[in-house]
Amino acid sequence: MTREKNSRLTISTEGDVTLVELAERRILDEVSISEIGDSLNALVVQSPKPRLVLDFSKVAHMSSSALGMLITLHKRTREKGGELRLCCIQPAIYEVFVITRLNEIFSIHQTRPQAMDSLK
Amino acid sequence: MHRVLNVVKRIAIASNFEEAAKVQNAILDEVGKFGYSEPSVFAIKLAVEECLNNAIRHGNKMDESKTVRVEYETDASKVRIAVTDEGGGFDPLDVPDPTADENLEKPSGRGIMLMRVYMDSVEYSPDGSRVVMVKHNR
């Protein structure tokens, strides 16, 4: 298992799965979203068949721009034949996914082990 | 009887997201003084973020020479927030429903819907360049 950390993300790998923990409480402002999006897209670009788990346990707020960033990431992951899982989304934020029906687009798991197991 | 008078606070900012974050924090500080519930604070934070993003990105087209004007007033029962940009306006009814099947995977277009869901009222001026939102503390 390898582990890499920057101020916004902690990235580790388990087998062929890349686990990304989002470190920011608020994924609201455009600068944060752009930087997080760039880092996540780089993971997709550098993998021939990306398998990503995003852990939201530290995230307390998100905006629609962040949802847009996730949709773009999801699309790019699928285009490469990869898979994306989201996990540990706090109830208030999960409600945003439900209101926007994005819970129907994303594969969302309550716990990190469940998300990791779903890729095995 | 002690009575808290509402004072309308007015701020004008350049069209950039750093300035928007300061306004958002100022509004949340004000709301915090009145002990709003956690769900109300979550809703206000989300709606203000979406509203300011729309004003900067779509209204003023990211032109920092253009101003976004924000008014807000708070008491223990409700907060009222008005945001005006210098753009040409738009018709909110022309914005596609982001929850329609054909729009679900579009990366944008959810901000106005979230504002409407999370605030108690959201009203646009006839030309669409000004929006007034109200949230009751529950």
Image: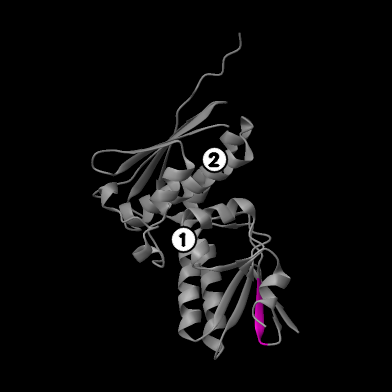
Q: Quick one: SS at disc 1?
A: helix
Q: Residue pushed farthest top?
A: B1
Instruction: For marks 2 and 1, give the CA distance.
Output: 21 Å
Q: Which residue is mark 1?
A: A65
- Label 2 crowd (10 A; few <14 / some 14-19 / many >=20): some
Return the x and y of residue A72 as percentages of the image width and height. 45, 72
Q: Which residue is mark 2?
A: B26
Identified at 52% across, 62% down, the residue is: A103
**Does any portion of residue A95 appear in the rendered image?**
yes
Residue A33: mark in rendering: none
User: Is the residue A77 above or below the residue B29 in the image?
Assistant: below
Q: The N terminus of chain A lies in which quarter of the figure? A: bottom right
Discs 2 and 1 lie in a common subunit? no
Identified at 52% across, 54% down, the residue is: A96
Relative horizontal placement of residue B41, taking residue A16 as reference (left or right): left
Q: Nearer the viewer, residue B29 or A119?
A: A119
Q: The C terminus of chain A lies in which quarter of the figure? A: bottom right
Return the x and y of residue A64 as percentages of the image width and height. 47, 57
**Does any portion of residue A5 appear in the rendered image?**
no
Residue A18 lies in magenta, yes or no?
yes
Q: Which span of residues is magenta-colored?
A: A16-20
Return the x and y of residue B42 as percentages of the image width and height. 57, 45
Q: Quick one: SS at disc 2?
A: helix
Q: Tell me the kind of residue under disc 2.
A: Ala
Identified at 52% across, 55% down, the residue is: A98
Magenta segment's dominant SS is strand
Chain ID, mark 1:
A
Query: By what rule are the colours in the image chosen?
Result: one colour
